[in-house]
Amino acid sequence: MTNILLVTSSPRGAESLSTRFATEIAEGLKLRLAATLVTRDLTANPPPHIAEAYIHGRVAAPEARTPEQAKAVGLAQQLVDEVKAADVIVLGSGMINFGPSSQLKTWFDHITWPGVTFGFSEAGRPQGLLTGKKVYLVTAAGGVFSQGDYAPFDFQTGYLRHLLGFIGLTDIEIVRVEGTVYGPEAAKAAIAATEAQVRSVLEKAA
C-alpha cells in the first residue's frame, strides 16, 4: 500500500494557499492510489527549535541520554520515521520574508540527521539516505518569483530543493502559486493556473 505524508507549514491558517493546494494533492493522491495519509501540521503543532539537548543527545548512546536529551531525540526520531514510512511526500510552504517559515526550517533541522538521513561517501561527499520517494513541493508567494526581477530573491524554492536533495529526496515536482498580490484579477488567474497544475499532477498519478 502507498503511504503519503502531508507536511503543511504556513502560519496563514485558512487563508494559506500552500496548505490548500498541498492538501488537495495529498487527498487526491490518497483517493487515486488507495493510499494511507499522515498529516503533519507544523503550525498547529510546531516542533521546538533544536537546542543543546538535541545536538548532544543525537550523538549519545541511547542508554547515556538524559531525560531531556531522550525527549528531544525522540521527537526527531518520530519526524524521521514519518518521512521514512512515506512513499510520497507532499510539502506545502508559504514564503515568509523570501524564504520558508521558521516552522518548516525547524522541521528540517530535526530530520537532517547525520548517519540517519544522510551520510558520507569514501571520498567525503554527502549522500542522502532517504531515496526512492516522490515529493510534491507546493510553494506559495504573493509576488512572482519563478521568473523576472524577483527570481534572484526566491530563497524558498531553491533552498527547499537543496535540503530535500541533501537527504536523498531528489524526485521533486514543484507546484507554484504566485502573483496573488497584484489585485483581484491577478489573484484569480494565479489560483486558476495552480488549480490546473494540481489537476495535471493528479491525472498523471491516476
Image (cartoon, rainbow, N blue to C red):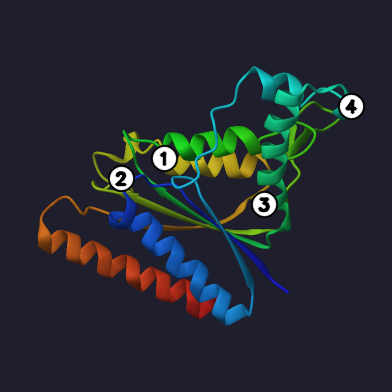
Q: Which residue is mark 1?
A: 156
Closer to the camera, 113 or 155?
113
Q: Earlier in the sequence, mark 2 or mark 3?
A: 3
Give the Cα distance between marks 2 and 3.
Answer: 28 Å
Residue 144 appears in the picture as rendered: yes
* Residue at 38% from the left image edge and 55% from the top image edge: 18
- Per the image, label 4 sits on a secondary structure element best described as helix
- Per the image, label 2 sits on a secondary structure element best described as loop
Q: Residue furthest front?
A: 67
Q: Quadrant of residue 57?
A: top right
Badge 1 vs badge 2, beta-carbon distance below 8 Å: yes
Left or right, 38 with reference to 168: left
Q: Which residue is mark 3?
A: 83
Closer to the camera, 119 or 29?
29
Q: Which residue is mark 4?
A: 63
Give the Cα distance between marks 1 and 2.
Answer: 9 Å
Q: Which residue is mark 2?
A: 145
The amino acid type found where label 1 is placed reads: Gln
Residue 186 position, x and y percent, is 15, 60
Q: Residues within 10 Å of mark 1 (few under 14, many from 20)?
A: many
